[in-house]
């Protein structure tokens, strides 16, 4: 059986037994309590398991892509070194949501394993939880497994999704590979290499709380998981997952790109397995919207890519290896995951850029280490090793290896303590997901009692409904025209009125999926549960919102047209006054690209094609090429929005009826919001018009001031600026001439080489310049000028020559006091400047200066 046959055999078996085949969800889970990455088949069913939503089917089966590494050294290091660990794996599972339980789940598993897989029942061992007599009895009495091959375990047979969340006792099925693989004694006492665990059946009935306590789930569920790769290695008679058909060909890809042969020596084998595994991991992660970064998921991806590159670097492979690994992965996996092939170019581009950057880092780190060694260091400090690791991304293993070659030490303890500090910081940042759950009780009760809120707001702006509850400032109705914030679109506002009261709705959100919460302020009387209510949304606001929502789809389409289909929505905001769209792309848009995006979008608007929205199955949506909306949708039916003939997306939002209603689409900004992430902001409809009008007004005002037509404004401004420059130049020259002429006249009046005079009107600087120019003329000894400058006040300047023996300060110190100011004894004995307030005393002050200079009358 190969992988494709196994996937079909497993899911086919359960479909025949009334299960709905549900496609794998993405690796980025969306439920607030889900782990960092999808780590089990049950993740996508969290709302059903927790009782937040009623399941659309009682039984399901799936093949789920999973990632369990968190990028820490301890878990990632195992990969390639043993026969089972993988960064990405597929999990086969069957699920019951409050439907069948142990008595059916156990016989199903046995039948599938022995009859469809054809495994010899005598080689199978079973473990159950120590306290689970019921499961042990079913295995023995119903299935017929001899008691000696049913063993009991504690912690190993209690499965939990994470620190908190769904959990329960479990039962595992093991395959005995035979005496040549080690000691007997079953899973409990025998050798791990001999007894291979391959299927875990979880009897899921608890929800682990943040305080560690177990709360009962609303229903008893079944959640099973069989590792596809392990099952294949058993069915294909292989000793390790590396030899099965989903991995061996990728190792082959690693062989060709590195030029090494698998099986030649142990170290090379480990390296080639790491390359193959990480190649698969990076391909799937990028495909699902993770990009290399230094945080969270992006960091895990970055570590995977860099570990792979490091293997190649250490094997002296110069050429880029990651694009080849991506290609090998896609070749093998695209049958089961066709979207990989569609995203091939994009995935390749991302890994290639990351590999190029990291190779650069590796070379820089080597240079730094070589310099250290050349400087005669005998030990590399913990701080240096951490700097290399953390800032440069240069791995500690390489630092150690190079140090060893050069015969010097690395302070590993110091490095570890720096790492500990960093881990603490990381942990503090990661506790976020454990804080959900307040008020959830009431919401769940409302949902259980009344079912999901009936949303009529696609077609009605006003509707009658019944008040179900008023909890704090949250009002719940059985049916409502109010759109609850979701898919980037903001919630509606408006009013809810009953016979006895009136409330303003300030916002609408989902309290739980399917349950609309209206945040209200009661402005008149009171509203009570059971009353009939008229709910009315703010229609003009909604009109603006729907223009922006359809506008967002059209811009999304136009961006893909201009930049390529790798452009993926990464978030959006659809508000009444503007729209914002975040998307994956590797660089800034050129101005002409932006102009084309805007022009293409507006072409669609003018074409005025109708917008159609309808519900259909996921399969059908995929067939017509609908672009999946950011985030997975639960449930089988999806809503497709066709905005004209070109844009097809899955979307639950509210839209215009025809593209012309959007009005002009105006892009107002485009910029980066993170690694490989861009944000575009735009306006539509009235907001676009308001912007045109504002700009037009501004231009008209400018034109009126310049006495030209608006079209002539830029040219006129250019000309005015030119004229101004010329005038300034001219003015400067006139000033200089005037100052020269004035200096001539003053010099002629000198008495005994001394000039004391008054000059009003100029600036303080003018006065100083004139004084200095005058003093520097032949025969001059000292100059004192006083003036009342344009800005008010009084200025006194004294300038003397060295030969005169006169100190400038002495000449004006008294005069300055007279005009109500003071002179500071500056550093320069030949120049002194003083300020004062009283211009009426200036002439008297200048008399004093004359006396001080010895030319007084
Ligand atoms: N969720 C269970 C597991 O992952 C089946 O083992």
Image (spheres, rainbow, N blue to C red):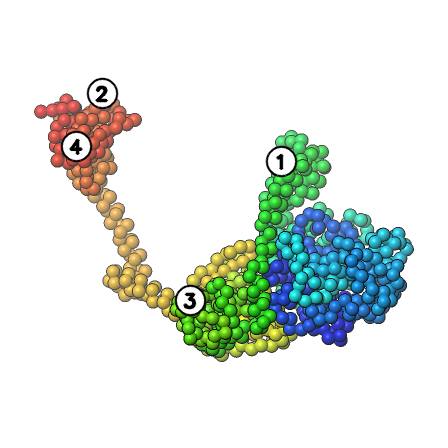
Pick the front one: 256 or 601 = 601
Vertical arrangement, residue 71 with respect to residue 786, above or below: below
The numbered mark at residue 522 is 3
Residue that carries the numbered disc 1 in the rendered image:
371
- Label 3: which secondary element: strand
Quadrant assignment for the C terminus: top left
Distance between mark 3 and mark 4 Cα atoms: 71 Å
Label 1: how many residues lie within 10 Å, few (<14), some (14-19) or many (20+)? few
740 lies left or right of 144: left
Give the residue displayed 31% in from the left and 57% down from the top: 718
Vertical arrangement, residue 734 with respect to residue 814, above or below: below
Quadrant assignment for the N terminus: bottom right
Disc number lying in front (1 or 3): 3
Residue that carries the numbered disc 4 in the rendered image:
819
| Quadrant of res 327 | bottom right
Give the residue displayed 55% in from the left and 69% down from the top: 515
């Amino acid at each position: 059986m190969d992988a494709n046959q196994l996937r079909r055999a497993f899911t086919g078996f359960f479909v025949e037994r009334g299960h709905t085949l549900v496609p794998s969800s993405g690796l980025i889970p969306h439920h607030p309590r889900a782990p960092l990455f999808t780590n089990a088949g049950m993740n996508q069913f969290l709302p059903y398991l927790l009782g937040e939503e009623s399941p659309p089917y009682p039984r399901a089966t799936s093949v789920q892509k999973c990632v369990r590494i968190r990028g820490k050294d301890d878990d990632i290091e195992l990969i390639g070194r043993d026969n089972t660990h993988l960064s990405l794996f597929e999990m086969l599972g069957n699920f019951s949501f409050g439907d069948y339980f142990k008595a059916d789940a156990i016989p199903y598993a046995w039948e599938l394993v022995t009859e469809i897989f054809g495994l010899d029942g005598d080689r199978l061992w079973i473990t159950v939880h120590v306290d689970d007599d019921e499961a042990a009895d079913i295995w023995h009495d119903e299935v017929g497994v001899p008691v000696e091959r049913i063993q009991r375990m504690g912690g190993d047979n209690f499965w939990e999704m994470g620190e908190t969340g769904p959990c329960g006792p479990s039962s595992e099925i093991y395959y005995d590979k035979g005496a040549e693989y080690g000691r007997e004694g079953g899973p409990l006492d025998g050798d791990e290499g001999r007894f291979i665990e391959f299927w875990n059946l979880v009897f899921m009935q608890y929800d682990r709380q943040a305080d560690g306590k177990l709360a009962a789930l609303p229903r008893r569920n079944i959640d099973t998981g069989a590792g596809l790769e392990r099952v294949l290695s058993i069915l294909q008679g292989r000793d390790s997952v590396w030899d099965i058909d989903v991995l061996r060909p990728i190792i082959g890809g690693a062989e060709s790109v590195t030029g090494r042969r698998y099986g030649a020596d142990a170290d090379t084998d480990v390296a080639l397995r790491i390359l193959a595994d990480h190649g698969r991991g990076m391909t799937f992660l990028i495909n699902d919207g993770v990009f290399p970064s230094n945080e969270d998921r992006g960091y895990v991806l970055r570590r995977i890519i860099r570990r792979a590159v490091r293997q190649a670097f250490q094997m002296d492979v110069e050429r880029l290896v990651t694009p080849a690994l991506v290609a090998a992965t896609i070749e093998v996996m695209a049958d089961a995951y066709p979207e990989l092939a569609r995203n091939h170019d994009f995935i390749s581009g991302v890994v290639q850029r990351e590999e190029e950057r990291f190779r650069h880092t590796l070379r820089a780190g080597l240079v730094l280490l070589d310099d250290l060694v050349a400087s005669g260091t005998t030990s590399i400090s913990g701080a240096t090793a951490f700097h290399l690791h953390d800032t440069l991304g240069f791995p500690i293993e390489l630092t150690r290896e190079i140090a060893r070659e050069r015969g010097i030490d690395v302070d590993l303890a110091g490095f570890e303590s720096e790492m500990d500090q960093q881990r603490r910081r990381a942990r503090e940042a990661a506790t976020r997901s454990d804080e959900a759950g307040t008020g959830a009780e009431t919401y769940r009760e409302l949902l259980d009692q009344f079912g999901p809120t009936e949303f009529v707001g696609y077609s009605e702006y006003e509707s009658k409904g019944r008040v179900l509850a008023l909890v704090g400032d949250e009002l719940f109705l059985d049916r409502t025209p109010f759109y609850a914030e979701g898919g980037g679109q903001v919630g509606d506002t408006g009013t809810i009125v009953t016979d006895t009261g009136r409330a303003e709705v300030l916002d609408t959100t989902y309290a739980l999926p399917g349950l609309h919460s209206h945040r209200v302020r009661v402005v008149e009387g009171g509203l009570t549960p059971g009353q009939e209510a008229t709910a009315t949304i703010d229609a003009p606001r909604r009109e603006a919102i729907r223009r922006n929502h359809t506008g967002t789809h059209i811009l999304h389409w136009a961006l893909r047209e201009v930049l390529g289909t790798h452009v993926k929505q990464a978030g959006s905001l659809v508000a009444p006054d503007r729209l914002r769209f975040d998307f994956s792309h590797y660089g800034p848009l050129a101005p002409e690209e932006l102009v084309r995006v805007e022009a293409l979008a507006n072409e669609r608007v003018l074409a005025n094609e109708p917008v159609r929205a309808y519900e259909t199955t996921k399969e059908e949506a995929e067939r017509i090429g609908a672009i999946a909306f950011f985030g997975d949708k639960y449930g089988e039916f999806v809503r497709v929005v066709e905005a004209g003939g070109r844009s097809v997306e899955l979307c639950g939002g509210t839209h215009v009826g025809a593209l012309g209603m959007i009005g002009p689409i105006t892009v107002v900004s485009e910029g980066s919001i993170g690694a490989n992430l861009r944000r575009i902001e735009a306006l539509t409809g009235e907001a676009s018009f308001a912007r045109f009008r504002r700009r037009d007004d501004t231009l008209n005002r400018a034109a009126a001031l310049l006495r030209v037509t608006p079209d002539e404004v830029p040219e006129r401004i250019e000309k005015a600026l030119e004229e101004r420059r010329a005038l300034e130049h001219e003015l400067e020259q006139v000033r200089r001439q005037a100052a020269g002429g004035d200096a001539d006249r003053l010099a002629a009046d000198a008495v005994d080489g001394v000039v004391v005079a008054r000059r009003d009107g100029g600036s303080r600087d003018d006065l100083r310049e004139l004084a200095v120019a005058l003093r520097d003329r032949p025969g001059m000894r000292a100059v004192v000028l006083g003036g009342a400058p344009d800005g008010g006040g009084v200025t006194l300047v004294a300038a003397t020559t060295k030969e005169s023996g006169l100190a400038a300060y002495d000449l004006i110190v008294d005069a300055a006091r007279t005009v109500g100011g003071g002179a500071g004894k500056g550093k320069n004995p030949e120049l002194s400047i003083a300020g004062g307030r009283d211009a009426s005393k200036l002439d008297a002050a200048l008399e004093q200066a004359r006396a001080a200079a010895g030319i007084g009358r």
